[in-house]
Image: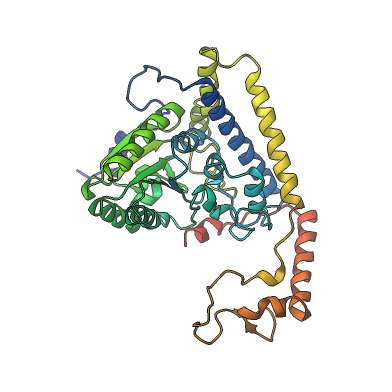
Amino acid sequence: MAHNPDTTQQAEVDRRPETDGRGSQPRALPDEATCRELLETMALIRRFEEEAGRQYQRAKIGGFLHLGIGEEATIVGTASVMEERDYLIGTYRTHGHALARGTSPDAVMAELFGREDGCSRGRGGSMHIFDLERRFMGGYGIVGGNLPIAAGLGLSSDYKGEDSVTVCSFGDGAVNTGNFGETMNLSALWSLPIVFLVENNLYGMGTSIERHSAVTDLSKKAEGYGVPGMRIDGMDLLAVREAVAEQIRIAREERRPTLLEAFTYRFRGHSAADPEVYRSKEEVEEWQQKDPIVAFAQRLSAEGMLVEGELDGIRQKAEERVLAAVEFADASPEPPLESLYDNLYVLGEEAIGGWYAVDERTPETHPGEIEREVGAGGEIRKLAEAGAAYAGQAEHGRKRPARDDEEEESER
C-alpha cells in the first residue's frame, strides 16, 4: 500500500487554535501594574507593526518587512520574564522583540526608515534590529543563522562566570537546517545556559509544517541531541510567561539548555510581499478569534483590572506613540553618502596593505578606506544624489511594487 505522507502528518498536527493541553484551569494573573504593562506592550507592538506595514506601502521603508501581528503573546510573554542581564536573539521578525526589551519605538522606526537615529544608525533595516545596551542581540536574515550565535552567547556567559541566560527565538522552518542540529549538540555537550524557543506559526514562509518537517512535533526535534523540549500555547500570554520563566530558571540554576515550542500564528503574510495563496481565509479568521490582545484584555476585565472602554484608551495611547515614532523617523537625517563603507572592517596599524573594499560606482574605482574623502564630492557625489532624486520621484509618483523574487532572495 502506498504511503501518503500528507495524511500521516495531518493527523499529528492539530491546526486549530485550541490550547496547550494543560486543561482549562485559568492561570493566576500577576499584579495589576504588571498586567497593565503587559497589555500596553502588546498593544504598542500591534500598532507599531500595522503602521510599519503602511509605511512600507508608502515606500518609506525599503528592503524586506516581516510583521509579527498575532504573535504578541509569545514575544511579550518571553521578554517579560527575562532579566536585564539576559540575552535575547531572534530572526528577521523582531521589531516586537526589540520593543518588548525596551528599545524606543523612535529608534526602531528610524531603523526601518534607514535613518541615522535608528538603533543601528540605519545600516541594518527591518531584518537586523539590534540593541546591545538592552542585550537584544539582533535579528538575522538567514534562516537558522542565529542559532550558532546563541551558542556563542551561552558559552561567553559560562566563560566569564556570569549567570546570564540566552533566549534564542526562531521559526519552525529553522528546525530543519544543519545549524539547528549542530547547535543543539554543542549546547547539550557543553551544558550551555540557553532557552531555545521555536515560534511555530505553522508555515516556513509559504510551506506548511506538514510539508517541510517529517517530525511535526517540534518539541521533540532536539531530544536526540540531549535537549529536552515541551509544547506551549503561544497565543496565551500567561502560558508563555509561566513556561519561559521555568526554562530560564533551569538554564540559570542548572546550566543546561532546553527547547520550547510555542504554537502561535501570524495574521499577516510571511512578508509584506506575500500573496498568501498557501492558506485559506477561513484558517486565518479562526486564529484571529484567539487574538492574544483581546483575550488578555477580556481576562483582565473579568478580574476587575480593566474597566469598559479602557482598552480603547490603551490603543489610543499606542497610536499616538507610534505616530510620534513615524514623525521622529521622518525627521531623522539620512546617513551621509560618504559613510557607505564605515564600520565594515577594523583597521589598525598592523592591517595588511591593500584595498579592503572597492567602490565601483564610477569608472574610476577607489579603495573603500578613502570613501569619506572621495565620496564627499566629485562624480560619485553627483551620481549618488541623482539616484536619490530619482528614488524620491518614484516615491511620490508610484506605489512600491512587490517583487516576486524577494522571498527567495531573503533565504540566501
Q: Nearer the viewer, residue 133 or 95?
A: 133
Counting from the top left corner in percent of width and height, residue 109 is at 65, 48
Q: Nearer the viewer, residue 68 or 260?
A: 260
Name the quarter where the N terminus is drawn. Answer: top left
* 293 displayed left or right of 241: right
Q: Is residue 210 above or below residue 182?
A: above
> In the image, what residue occupies the spot 49% across and 49% down?
135
> In the image, what residue occupies the spot 42% across and 33% down?
234
Counting from the top left corner in percent of width and height, residue 373 is at 71, 79
Determine which quarter of the picture holds residue 18.
top left
Residue at the extreme front of the image, as rendered: 161
Residue 13 shows in this picture:
no
> In the image, what residue occupies the spot 23% across and 54% down?
189
* 16 displayed left or right of 230: right
Total numbered labels: 0
Q: Is residue 24 above or below residue 168?
A: above
* 118 displayed left or right of 274: right
Residue 85 shows in this picture:
yes
Counting from the top left corner in percent of width and height, residue 249 is at 33, 37
Query: Which of the colour schemes (rainbow, by chain, secondary structure, one colour) is used?
Result: rainbow
Q: Is residue 412 above or below residue 328?
A: below
Counting from the top left corner in percent of width and height, residue 290 is at 49, 26
